[in-house]
Image (spheres, coloured by chain):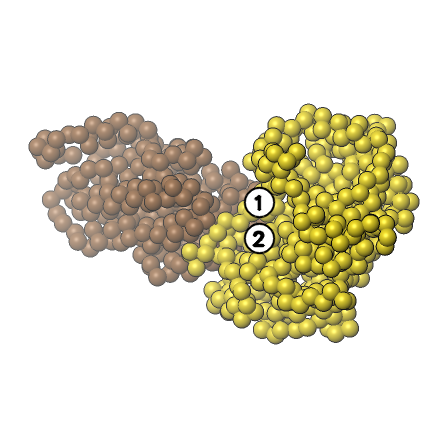
Amino acid sequence: MQKNFTQLENFGHSLSAPSYLIKPTTTDEISEAFSIAKKLELTITARGAGRSYNDAALVGGGIVLDMCGMNAITEWDPSIGLITAQPGTTLEQVWQKVVADGWWPPVVSGTMTTTLGGCLAANIHGKNNYKMGPIGEHVVEFTALLPTGAEITCSPQRNGDLFYAMISGLGMLGIFTSVTMQMKRIHSGLLSVDAFPVRNLHEHLTSLLDGAPNYNYIVGWLDGTARGKSLGRGQIHATRYLNEGEDPNPQETMKVSNQVLPPRIFGVFPKSLLHYFMSPFMNNLGAWGINTAKYIASLRKHTFRQSHAAFHFLLDYVPNWEYSYGRGGLIQYQSFLPKETAEDAWQEMLQLSHRNGLPTYLGVTKRHRPDKFLLTHAVDGFSLAMDFKVIDKRRAELGVMLQEFDKIVIQAGGRFYFAKNSETTAETAQKFYGEETIAKFKKLKKRCDPKGLLESDLYRRIFE
Amino acid sequence: MSTPSKSVQSTPLNPRRRGIIIGASDGIGAALAHKLAKEGYTLALIARRNDKLNTICAEINSAEREARVFPYAHDVANYQEVPGLLRKIIAELGGLDLLIFMAGVNFPPGLTTYNFEGDRKMVEVNLIGAMAWLSPVAEMFQHAKAGQIVGISSVAGDRGRIGNPGYNTSKAGLTTYLEALRNRLTRHGVNVLTVKPGFVNTEMVKAAQGSTPFIISPEQAADDIYKAIRKRKQVIYTAPIWRWIMLIIQHVPSVIFRRMSF
């Protein structure tokens, strides 16, 4: 086991924890890993692509199951858009499989490197959350191996309680072994994007709220460095699918080769080097410069067509962009607030960040609606994701500020999303999940995992 | 054993380094435990004597107002216990960044008498005990490509002298073992620090005969070691003057050294 000892990091490189890494390729090998864990009295957690900004896929001193070896697409029916794949399959593999047949994953994350298992465990959402819900709503059926050794099949009708708990369950009830999902029909490889500026937080949220019903996707960029009357200014990208006939040549635009992100800028400069050139700007002054320039550029209201991949996978546009944040890495703080309280709460939070001299270098807003999953993070309202650079000297200060943020969000009836937040305490988690939900989850945990074999650092942090 | 509640989770804004100190119940070990806990480490403290260990843990945890240190009773000569205990500690701490081996015994046989049992015990604890702990940790750190190992050897390992052949041998062996680990592990990003204390005001020194020049307090030694850990040094003497003293002593020709009563 000593040979398997591996230092693993989170996405953002702000955390690392050593674990014994096991890479199963079959369900039997997952079973075997459970036996090893039991024998050595270690806890175990599954890890997909490791794209959580927090400790969801880490278990320091325990066993990490690297699921990337189980990444086969086992069935694809282009006539009805139903795909079945192993849990280590990435969204990249999925869209590349289905796009040429005129389908697209109904819900995707901001990076395509995430795995289906990870997406289900976090119950990810996309820029269409207000319309399509989280990814779990498009899962037709999944199978999972429980620590008890039982392999179960779940769908909304069959083992419904586990279906709604394991999706969103942060990997703490069992390990997904196969996922069947419904894809969404598309009539072009392109999307029509309307881009327009918003001058302040009120206009920002109103635009999201009013714009959402008219579009398939809506997302806002928020200038975290703007103050005073301009606080919360930014740009909205409101996007719709092209209808049949709007794209004269859909076969061409839906080709994988026309979707892939170019590896070079202007055809010459390799993007893999770009993060080195970004790091000098990753400080308060540089971020102000970039955000301001971006806002000025966004003042031109315009409409353009963009490929699905280019629109959705912004985080893949600059490879290893997270390294530009330097040695301490970055953390992301995302809060979900009801539409009634969001404006006041975020105004307070943004002002607090300015007073502390700790502005977010990147802010992203989305529109959401509630869902039926047990550990849901969604509300009828909005989310704001903020990236913060972790600087050695200012860790404590930033920590105090984020605890203040937590109080504001809880007060305003908000929620958090555990693919993102890394500082939330058990006390805060209890407040927004509610005791009843936690009791229900723990009861299911007792049933699926009586010996408590499944445990991530995230679970230790927020549930123990 | 009174076990405090679980350790605080490491987060990006409240990072916790995690360490093990073997031989932490008194002397430099205890002082270093206080120092590292104060600097934010979460620690597993290992010693044979349960009562002393619990007292130190209670002291530190109440001073830091948080469960920072956890006691584990273990006799380093009990080699087969090591792999399981190591795994358990790493799981409970949530990882491992630093291992400090400073368990040591000293049984001076007298200038003209011999004591095999004492010699054997010194080698079993000071050298083989160290190998039992350092070799699995070295393997883990090598694969993780991270970590730091600290071995407390002694100026006594720099030369074989008339007073205590067994102790000299155990510490010379440890110094060489640490050097070999360093040469293996540096290329994997792991630092190995050899600490060679001179006289430190501990029970071990009180038991030894003769004069004790340049004696320092355990706290002073702990400060020196902590600084060396932070700077990822390779070999340090504490007090630092011993580097120069030992440089001279190492170069005294045997023809003279044989005749010295030193």
Please say if A62 is above or below A295: below
Does label 2 lie on the same chain as label 1? yes
Which residue is found at the position 86% from the left and 31% from the top?
A199
Colour chosen for chain A: yellow
Please say if A159 is above or below B51: below
In depth, the one of B181 and B11 nearer the eye is: B181
- Determine which quarter of the picture holds residue B183: top left
> Which mark identifies residue A58?
2
Q: Is residue B35 left or right of residue A247?
A: left
Residue A198 screen position, x and y as percent:
86, 34
Q: Helix, strand, or loop for circle 1?
A: loop
Q: Helix, strand, or loop for circle 2?
A: loop
The span from disc 1 to disc 2 (Cα, nearest Å) is 9 Å
Number of numbered callouts drawn: 2
Which quadrant is the N terminus of chain A positioned in? bottom left
* Residue B48 in view of the camera: no
Query: Circle 2 marks a residue in which chain?
Result: A
